[in-house]
Image (cartoon, rainbow, N blue to C red):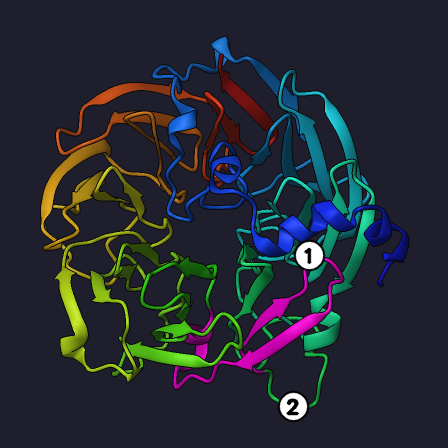
Amino acid sequence: MRLPACEYLASHRLPLVLVLLGMPLLARAENWPQWRGPFSNGSAAAAAAGLPEAVDPATAKWVAAMPGASHATPIVWGERVFVTSTDPASKGLLALCVNAADGKIRWQQRLGDEIKAPQNNGATPSAVTDGKLVWFLFGSGDLAALDMDGKPLWQRNLVAEYGNFCIQFGYSSSPLLWQGRLYVQILRRPKPYRGAAGTDQPLESLILAIDPLTGKTLWQHVRNSAAVDESLESYSSPVPLENPGRNELLIQGGDCLSGHDPATGAELWRLDYNPERATIWRLIPSPVSMGDLIVATKPRGGPMFALKAGGSGALRPDAVAWTYDERTSDSGTPLVYQGLIYVLQSDKSDPFVRGNKSSPGIFLLVIEPATGKEVGRCKLAKGGAWRTSPTGGDGKIYVMSEEGEVVVVAAGPTGKILSRADYADGPACATIAAANGCLYIRTASKLTCIGK
């Protein structure tokens, strides 16, 4: 359902021009505007100086009870924190705005119906904001734009328009706001595991560019793949590559990593990393960029690899600049921080390199970007599930286990653990957000603010 926008656009014409032109870098950097932060790489800005070293929940600035579970990262802009939640009472999906100063709920809107998915929920995608509007996407396909006071501007349902998302464990890709467009990826199987397909034809994998002001689709690109069965599915999110040579939209899943023209969606290049067509290579981590380097991990904790930006067409294996062959992450996206790459190992070594030195435990790996060599590691735990992505800020790395244990590690190759705390509120799968000297930690039933 689309909601009237004419009155809103008329009264906000000048501020909304800033959305299309892009907000100043400083304003963007002071906040945590989308899933992987102000730079789309998991790092906070210098404005986040003073981030806490100790994260004991007993010393929290405030704790806000949430209506239900969510795996989405809190999104922070100024005095507002945007979170999503399931709502067991109404069996709905909620968009909430929390006061950053004291944790009080400013407003909430029910934007969709909860979906059923193993090990996941419909409130998994993270919101995105530019400080003027905020956009929410849910696993139900509901996508909406609201103003900062919670007034809906427009709303549509992507499942109703494009068919079942067809992802076994529930859709979890977060939208990307970049250069005046809202990007959404739907990499899926042609037939659903459950529910109606919504069409008589096999479902296609799509990349969408949407006008953030009106909700209209600007373009859609069909991203074909030779992948088979579960390998067609991707839980990752679109990532921007800003490079003097050429800006690209990075998309990973369906057995390949590809770069696309952000203005049209046209595919510029792709690297196929599963020529054997293993059928279980669903992908969870997103790629990340670092200068002219594109870094990605293969599915299920497989090797991490790097490409130089600027490729064209079908890339050969020798296009890979380097490969790190040890177990990496089944779930978490790498962090780029202070000239290094950090990878939080996940919960298993399947199907790669069983029995190597990484297997007995969970480690935070430190990788040199020029060579792909490991320059440090920190053992975080003997085992368990660690499905969040690491966050970097103020010389520290923040990570969290699914059970809700938060560990703070000193940035750099030494791997020194600075503190740890048990929030005892799992499952906790939301990445920690860092903004304005505070950490925002979303666990199963709470949103906790740690900081000044």
- Residue 21 locus on image (x, y percent): 59, 54
- Whether the residues at callouts 2 and 1 have beta carbons within 8 Å, the answer is no
Q: Is residue 312 left or right of residue 251?
A: left
Q: Position of residue 133 (x, y in %)?
A: 70, 45
Q: Nearer the viewer, residue 283 or 287?
A: 287
Q: Which of the two labelled residues, at mark 2 and mark 1, occupies the earlier sequence position?
A: 1
Percent x, y for residue 58? 49, 10
Q: Which residue is mark 2?
A: 201
- Magenta segment, which residues? 204-233
Residue at (13% x, 63% y) in the render: 322
Q: Which quadrant holds residue 164?
A: bottom right
Quarter containing the N terminus:
bottom right
Q: Taking 373 as reference, is 244 left or right?
A: right
Q: Quadrant of residue 405?
A: top left
Residue at x 36% of width, y 48% of height: 332
Q: Amino acid at mark 1?
A: Ile
Report the mark closest to the observer, 2 or 1: 2
Question: Of 180 and 125, which appears nearest the observer?
Answer: 180
Q: Is residue 347 above or below residue 282?
A: above
Question: Can residue 90 be seen at all in this image of the molecule?
Answer: yes
* Residue at (65, 57) in percent of width and height: 116
What residue is drawn where x is 46% and y is 85%? 224
Q: Is residue 325 magenta?
A: no
Q: Residue lying farthest front?
A: 14
Mark 1 crowdedness (10 Å alpha carbons): few <14, some 14-19, many ≥20: some
